[in-house]
Image (tube, rainbow, N blue to C red):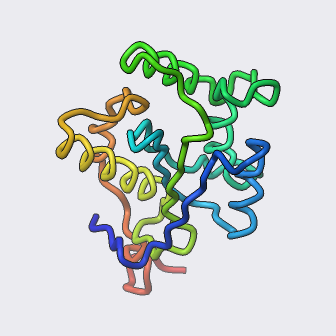
Amino acid sequence: MKINWKIIPKHTIDVGKLTDPYEICDLLKQHKIRKYVYRINYKGIVLKYGMSADKSRNYGDRLYRQIAHSESWGARRNNGSSGSDWRIIEDDFHKLYGSKIDKAEMKIKIWNLTNYPFVSIDPTKEVFYVEQNLIETYAKVVGEKPIGNINDDANYKRKGYIPKNLFGNDGLFED
């Protein structure tokens, strides 16, 4: 699958300007962003690439759950289990760099795939492919994956997908 990066709208969220992590959901709802991939940066260091959990009723739920677990939210920090893997990212970052992540210096880049012209019958697989493409490109340039992308999903990409046009009016299926 070839990704047409030129037609994908991009948005940036300065997390330091947010007063509550749930504002991420409000911003994505405002822009009607349902399908997306994202990159979380801290002081120019890429922490993680991720993708939407598109079965959620809330806009931006997956991204919100990640960011809401940041220790720097203080009393507003999310203590639930969903998205708690972010705490591991913060611990690993502290061990590696000797400092804690502060939301004031965090930026999120979002690639909005909501209206992307997907070619398969399963857009979630294509969103995942876009995320994996970003991770692989980063790893080729930097020499390793971002600290928050510790799982290796390379085999997922080798699985085929079913193109939409297979179900077109070509006589393959009859009424």
Q: In the orientation shown, which residue stands out farthest toward the bottom?
A: 169
x, y percent for residue 148: 43, 31
Q: Going 78% across and 45% down the picture, which residue do you hit?
A: 19
| Point 64% across, 64% down: residue | 33
- Residue found farthest to the top: 95
For the question of whether residue 158 can be seen, the reply is: no
Percent x, y of residue 27: 72, 60
- Of residues 3 and 5, the one nearer the viewer is 5
* The one of 129 and 94 positioned closer to us in this rendering: 94
Question: How many marks do you count on the picture?
Answer: 0
x, y percent for residue 11: 55, 65
Query: Is 146 displayed left or right of 20 in the figure?
Result: left
Could you tell me which quadrant the C terminus lies in? bottom right
Establish if 53 lies above or below 1: above
Q: Residue at the location (53% across, 58% down)? A: 36
Residue 133 image position (x, y, % from top left): 30, 52
Locate residue 55 relative to residue 151 in the image: left or right: right
Which image quarter is the N terminus in?
bottom left
Question: In terms of depth relative to the viewer, which is nearer, 97 or 47?
Answer: 97
Q: Name the residue nearer the viewer: 163 or 45.
A: 45
* Residue 82 in the image: above or below residue 30: above
Residue 98 in view of the camera: yes
**Residue found at the far right of this picture:** 75
Whether residue 50 sits left or right of residue 147 in the image: it is right
Residue for point 80% across, 30% down: 76
Q: Give the image quarter of residue 95.
A: top left
